[in-house]
Amino acid sequence: MLSTLRRGPASLQHLLRYASQAPSAGRSSCRRIDALQITRPNIVIPHIRAFTYSARWRQEAAAAASQIESSDPLLEFQELESRGLVHSSVIQTIVKDMGLSRMTDVQTATINEALAGDDIVAQAKTGTGKTIAFLLPILQKIIAEDPTLATRGPRRRTTPDDIRAIIISPTRELAEQIAVEARRITKNTGVIVQSAVGGTQKSAMLAQTQREGCHILVGTPGRLADLLQDPYSEIRAPKLSVFVLDEADRLLDDGFWPEIKNIESLLPDREANNIQTMMFSATIPPDVVSAVRSILKPGFRFVKCVRDDEEPTHERVPQKVVRTLGLENNLPALVELCLRELDNSKEDPSSMPFKAIVYFNSTAMVQLAEGVLQNLGNRRGPSPLGPARVFGIHSKLGQGQRTRASDGFRRSTSGILLSSDVTARGMDFPNVTHVIQIGPPQTADAYIHRIGRTGRAGKPGTGYLFVTPIEEAVTRQRLGSLPLQKDESLAAASVDMTQAGQIPARVASILTTLSDAHRGVPRDVMSAAYRSLIGIFGYVNDKERVVEAMNTYARFGWGLSQPPALSAMLVQKLGLSRVPGIVTDNGMARGRGAGDYQRGGMGSRMGRGRDSRSSGGAQGDAFDQAFEGERDFGRQRDSGRQRNSGGFQSRQRQQPRW
Ligand SMILES: Nc1ncnc2c1ncn2[C@@H]1O[C@H](COP(=O)(O)OP(=O)(O)OP(=O)(O)O)[C@@H](O)[C@H]1O
């Protein structure tokens, strides 16, 4: 805020106007930055490129911000109609049917620019209404080109090669969600929306599109490319006028980039045909800047609704870090947290019912947690989770199962969705009160998108991150700049499951229930979860420590008398042959760790002393001291890729508060 104020009277006036009129759904002010003209370097060295861009961008952004024009921003959807900018049938649907009146910051800042036809890249916090920010101008553009589409005629039909807008999303669920929102907005018009996502029957989608035609096509990259290059699909876009990348930074990263370039090659030339391109995301890390430039026309607008001195997450969403003593403490602490929050919402009927998304770092861990939580009620009466239904979603499910889980959770008043990152971006599940992350995500940006599933559209929410000692260093490296606060309220997080000792009654009852629930989980689910941990902890050099943590988990968390066996070939390939505690499928248990292990079992809390574990649970450990006074420990040494989340430029890191 201060740095913006220092820029002078013009920007001060602009800032105060936005601040005083900011709609409830988003408190940040947006800056519209014209023609971001930074020449592309010939030599690209990833980590230097990020720095060069950030320094140059900062200067240009400051210069551009001081020239922002002073016309009054439009704040109400209704004003778009009264000033003749958007057709009344669209605005009436938004206002009357969807019940929206005031635009959010990002909508105010982008809709007018988009209506003018500019290429736009927009960065705004999660849950601030970016979907309508691109759907509304698309719709108006289509209606302006063909006014007969402004109202809904008796025969609502066109051809499959009448596509005017293509919207790409990185995940199937998000593409479907955008298509649903697009159908709501176009309800009273003649505009036809189709969705094209992987995992669904291509033939059914083709038949529908050939029958009804298409004006707006929403899809995932693979299926879109497939349809556009299929000589028999009839799906073509010679009249394309808008091209949108939602979650643009994800679509422009290495995984999707070739697919996006392929789609681009199947569409009319964007400059020659004056096709408008828009990109939206809550995060725009420096390493996608050159890809952004290569897609947008020169002179594009950058609308930035996250200030440089501001956290990229919502202030109203407290974010708590729970240090769990070992991997085996995670599920008990999760159940304790869910039970407590369910109780709290029962005691306070004015609060929102407990509805949580729990993120795990592998599909196998989601499957395991789902198996256990679904079993909670099977053996000793009803589930203690009571009204909160449990759902699981990940990429190994068929699309039908994914849709059922996602729809079921969406409709539930209270529920727990156990999820991999397939729901981390863009998904707008209503009234999610908690996002709980079991282990740190790969990047700060991934954390921001996950936590963004709560606290949407101005609502409250809370975030929790569970971190075991083995994950602490990397958590600080990845998330050091975020406003995380230590939380020690969960007793199950710090119970030493390897010791027979005093366990609080509430925790003991959770452990007993969980122990029962684990018995019903198939062994191969546990084996897959065990294997996935090796991948999750690939960044830890000390493999003995990793295997020890995994084996303690399997024994004291899952009740196994021996750790799951790994294929001898895999062990060889991963260079784990000499690591104590590894059990291979040719029957060889390696080293002392595995021998010790066989004496244990679920409920046996004997055999391993606290001294065999690494430090880390308590404050003031070697870890804290090592980082004392160090300001910038945000580099991701493990990934080699700096994906800072503050915007095009890096944000200065702060000392973590946990
Ligand atoms: N002007 C508005 N006023 C109130 N609510 C709004 C407004 N615009 C959109 N919403 C609602 O806000 C919620 C979040 O919108 P949306 O999913 O578009 O957010 P987003 O910015 O795209 O989030 P993400 O970054 O997670 O993709 C939706 O439920 C949407 O209906």
Image (cartoon, helix red, strand yellow):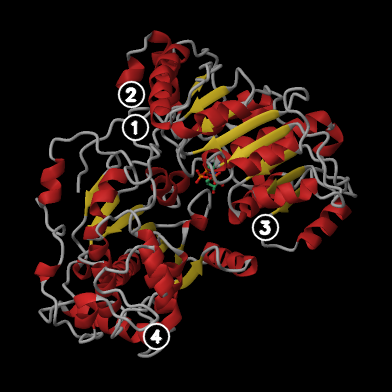
Using the image, determine if residue 546 lies above or below residue 148: below
Using the image, determine if residue 153 lies above or below residue 362: above
Residue drawn at 68 percent across, 37 percent down: 91
Nearer the N terminus, badge 1 or badge 3? 3
Type of amino acid under label 1: Glu
In the image, 393 versus 594, the foreground residue is 594
For disc 4, does the CB lie below 8 Å from ligand 1? no
| Residue depth check, mark 2 versus mark 3: number of the one nearer the observer | 3
Residue located beneath label 1 in the image: 310
Residue located beneath label 2 in the image: 1
Nearer the N terminus, badge 2 or badge 3? 2
For disc 1, does the CB lie below 8 Å from ligand 1? no
Mark identifier at residue 382? 4
Nearer the N terminus, badge 3 or badge 4? 3
How far is mark 2 from mark 4, CA to CA? Answer: 52 Å
CB within 8 Å, label 1 to label 3? no
| Label 2 element class | loop
CB within 8 Å, label 3 to label 4? no
Nearer the N terminus, badge 1 or badge 4? 1
Type of amino acid under label 3: Gly
Res. 29 visible in picture:
yes
Task: Give x and y (percent) for residue 424.
Answer: 48, 53
Res. 368 visible in picture:
no
Type of amino acid under label 4: Pro
Nearer the N terminus, badge 1 or badge 2? 2
